[in-house]
Image: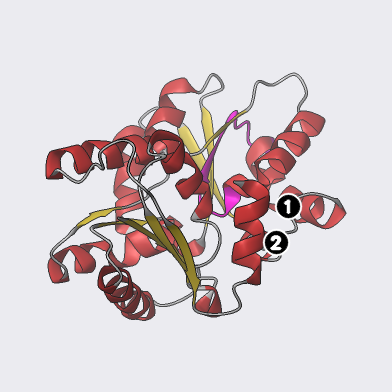
Amino acid sequence: MIGIFDSGVGGLSVFREIRKLLPEESYIYYSDNAHCPYGEKSKEYIIDRTREITAYLIERGAEIIVVACNTATAAAISTLREEFPIKFIGMEPAVKPAVKSTRTGVVGVLATAGTLKADKYLCTREKFSEGIKVVEHIGQGFVELVEKGCVSGKEAEETVMASLKPLLDEGADRIVLGCTHYPFLAETIHKIAEELYPDREIEIIDPAPAVARHLIEVMREEGLLTSKNTTYNISLHSSGDGTCLENTYNNLL
């Protein structure tokens, strides 16, 4: 069984990509929405929460865990790997493919404060961005929008505009989504980008498909892939009200 967790419903964007490739696996998903968002929380707080969630998932049969949260990956995945005897798959902003494909020489990164100041992200940016301008902005209010199911319309557009426009004004033609909640706003991001710069070929880069492929590689190496034609199960769990999780799962997957 594959365990997946996030601070809220954002990790469902990763689960969606994983299930496309592994439709016959069983899954247990945990939304820590009672403690969402993680972006401004301390590293110690996030480590404590992810420890508790990991134990919860393992107790219920998880054999491998996807930390489907960029902030939690940055803050806690090293600790989790030291303390628990299973494999963990984490997230990180897809700076490398963005740098390789940009035509304007400018890459924009939308992420939480926790991700943008994390050592792993800073090292990745330093390693791959030589000769390329990387501009960053916190997706202010993005997580809250997705958690309440507001991914389009006036409120969503105004909120996205405030964080996206500065990146586009700097010349970015690649927008890296550095939080798993943000792909649920991809259509709104596309709409605003096309309205502001209709002549620029702007691409939104979501790391989830690459994470799904990496998960398969690790599961194959560990002998964890399920045989075809077996009965699978999907269970959803949350630390708070599960209504948003169930609605997002039913509406977007």
Q: Residue at x 74, y 42 (%)?
A: 188
Q: Position of residue 8 (x, y in %)?
A: 53, 66
Residue occupying image coordinates x 64% and y 57%:
248
Q: In this view of the protein, can residue 8 be seen by the observer?
A: yes
Q: Is residue 250 magenta?
A: no
Q: Name the disc covering residue 151, or none.
A: 1
Badge 1 amino acid: Val
The amino acid type, in three-letter code, at marker 2 is Leu
Residue 249 in the image: above or below residue 59:
above
Q: Pointer 1 and pointer 2: residues touching (CB < 8 Å)?
A: yes
Q: Residues within 10 Å of mark 1 (few under 14, many from 20)?
A: many
Q: Is residue 188 left or right of residue 201?
A: right
Residue visible at 25% across and 38% down? 227
User: Who comes first in sequence, dot 1 or dot 2?
Assistant: 2
The magenta segment is 169-182
Residue 99 place in picture, x, y as percent: 43, 28
Residue 170 falls left or right of residue 211: right
Query: Label 1, label 2: how many angstroms apart (C-alpha)?
Result: 6 Å
The residue wearing badge 2 is: 145
Residue in view at x 73 percent, y 52 percent:
151
State the residue in front, 114 or 238: 238
Return the residue nearer the eye: 213 or 130.
213
Q: Is residue 207 visible?
A: no
Residue 9 placed where, x, y %? 56, 61
Coloring applied to the structure: secondary structure
Quadrant location of the N terminus in the rendered image = bottom left
